[in-house]
Amino acid sequence: MDKEKKSLCALIDGFAGKSIAVWGDFILDEYVYGNTNRVSREAPVLILSYNKREFSLGGGGNALLNLKALGAAPFPIGVIGSDTAGEEIIRILKSKGIPTDFLIQEKTFSTPAKIRILAGEENTRKQQILRIDREGRVPNTTNIRIKLVKHLRYAQEKANALLISDYNYFNVKENIYKKILPDFKKAKIPVAVDSRFRMLSFKQSTVSTPNEPEVEDALKIHLADEKDNLKKTGSRLLKQTGAEAILLTRGSKGMVLFVKEKAPLYIPVHGTTDIVDVTGAGDTVISVFTLALTAGGTFSQAASLANYAGGLVVMKKGTATVDCKKLKEAVVS
């Protein structure tokens, strides 16, 4: 094993027990499975014979599960509803040994949920035929803001890093971010940002990890493959966000790491380019990148590990996690 791979494996060993606060939107993913063998007489639609349903966590919840699988000690900060979906999120987190003390249950807010209907004939693989999303904005009340700031102050004192997972349900409020960021920076605590639609709103972070569509939407551009074009885009992102680093994820085209006053680092995708499912891959990427920083890694080392992890999870169906053993195997292979 060469020196760089040994260094990466040492960083993975350093993930154990790292306290990571995850501030963001916590989503309940529900999968309803049914068998189909006839069409309704009432309308030209399939009739599903209910088989089962399963639950998993999306959004910031998937980041929590990734961090936990990697040996860290994550805890969520945010608002969920006082509803069945909110209770299910709490149940799943507790079953994984993740504390829920800093989750605020709000009666006037419905927990975001994505209900996927999967159907097929008996003994065949079920395919998704419909998705129903329940969405809403976290209320911007004084009481909620006070509680969020209080929990984030605790994180600033106790956590090794703050991971922000923003899916546009407004758990992550810009005014609160601006208020708490200086103390995190003063304490030299990494702040990693993954924002679906508001990446330019959360400035001065340690790292931001957008994908290509998010960058195109934020900058109102079409991102071409030419390296000159990518380099200009990276410089623009660094300038407009004020982030120390930008990790641009490009699916089967790998990643590009942009760091102030350094040449871009182009990282080819790990493994095959025949990707099975990119769902939740961004959560894995930012989780590994954040942990690598807390373990003392450089931006380039963190990006390399995140790329290995991303290459593993996109070969799995649905949201997935990777553990330290599998990550090390990918590094040394």
Image (cartoon, grey):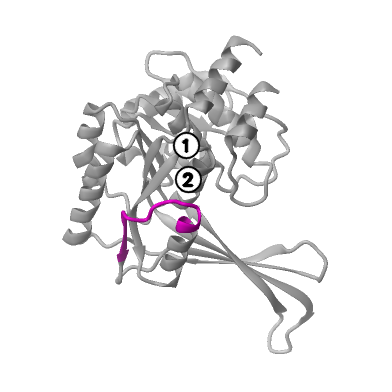
301 above or below 195? above
Query: Which image quadrant: the C terminus?
Result: top right
Residue 256 appears in the picture as rendered:
no
Q: Quadrant of residue 251?
A: top right
Find out whether the residues at labels 1 and 2 contact each other: C-beta distance under 8 Å.
yes
| Helix, strand or loop for disc 1 | helix
Query: Which image quadrant: the N terminus?
Result: top right
Residue 219 appears in the picture as rendered:
yes
Q: Which residues are magenta?
A: 93-105
Kindly identify which numbered label has been placed on residue 286: 1
Earlier-in-chain disc, 1 versus 2: 2
199 above or below 224? below
Q: Count of labels shown?
A: 2
Residue identifier under label 2: 63
Relative side of 101 to 314, left or right: left
Front residue (pair 198, 55) = 55
Relative side of 76 to 29, left or right: left
